[in-house]
Amino acid sequence: MENQLKIRKASLEDVNLIAEIKTKAYRDEKERFKPEEDKIPKWFYSEWYIDIPENIRLINEYNVYLLTVNEVVIGTFWVHDVYEDTIELEDFCILPEYQGFGYGYKALNMMEGMFEKKKRWVLGTPFYSIKNHYLYQKAGYKKVGTVSDETVIVYEKIMI
């Protein structure tokens, strides 16, 4: 059976699952790519993604989605409008055991297809998340700057 990636809209019933996915993905990333002690940003130890009320707010106010492979939930993300032609990708997480199989790259292409009227995509990722940097660059995103005292790399993709 082919491992078919699908995207489905999240509901309030998914809130605990979303928090679990974010927690596993972000904790794994922090452990694997832990920056040098003197370069650890203030937000590094914060675990805001566990916050159930915040995840409920995101589901109620934005477009929150789940990624599934053969009906198994493997990831999550949410998007919001920045400007009429610009959309921002947030909390794009894939469970650690499903990373490295091309799902991230395929999911990015699928997301862009879902919002094809958006001509500019923006996202941010921690400076130490080397695998994320590679994925976004492979998918056509370009580094355009930094935020949070240069600890978050901002990427942009202009759609043709």
Image: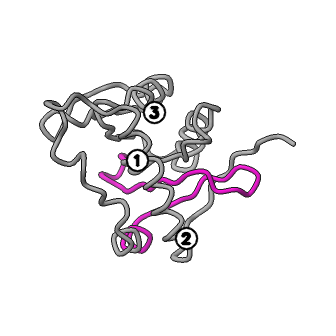
Picture quadrant of residue 9: bottom right
In the shown orientation, is residue 156 left or right of residue 118?
Answer: left
**Looking at numbered disc 3 in the image, what kind of residue is underneath it?**
Met
* Among the two numbered marks 2 and 1 on one chain, the one whose residue lies closer to the N terminus: 2
SS label for mark 1: helix
**Looking at numbered disc 2 in the image, what kind of residue is underneath it?**
Asp
* Among the two numbered marks 1 and 3 on one chain, the one whose residue lies closer to the N terminus: 1
Residue that numbered label 2 is attached to: 14
SS label for mark 3: loop
Residue that numbered label 1 is attached to: 26
Q: Depth check: 27 or 61 in front?
A: 27
Marks 2 and 1, how far apart in space? Answer: 18 Å
Marks 1 and 3, how far apart in space? Answer: 28 Å
Residue mark closest to the camera, 2 vs 3: 2
From what the image shows, is residue 49 above or below residue 1?
Answer: below
Residue that numbered label 3 is attached to: 159
In percent of width and height, residue 31 lies at 38, 39
Q: Which mark is residue 135?
A: none
Q: Depth check: 30 or 143 in front?
A: 30
Q: Is residue 154 magenta?
A: no
| Crowd tier of the residue under label 2, counting other residues whose Cα lies within 10 Å: few below 14, some 14–19, many 20 or above | some
In percent of width and height, residue 109 lies at 57, 37
Question: Residue at 36% of width from left, 55% of height from top?
Answer: 81
Q: Is residue 85 magenta?
A: yes
Question: Residue at 55% of width from left, 70% of height from top?
Answer: 14
From what the image shows, is residue 108 above or below residue 49?
Answer: above
Q: Main secondary structure of the magenta part?
A: strand
Q: Depth check: 26 or 56 in front?
A: 26
Q: Which residues are magenta?
A: 57-86
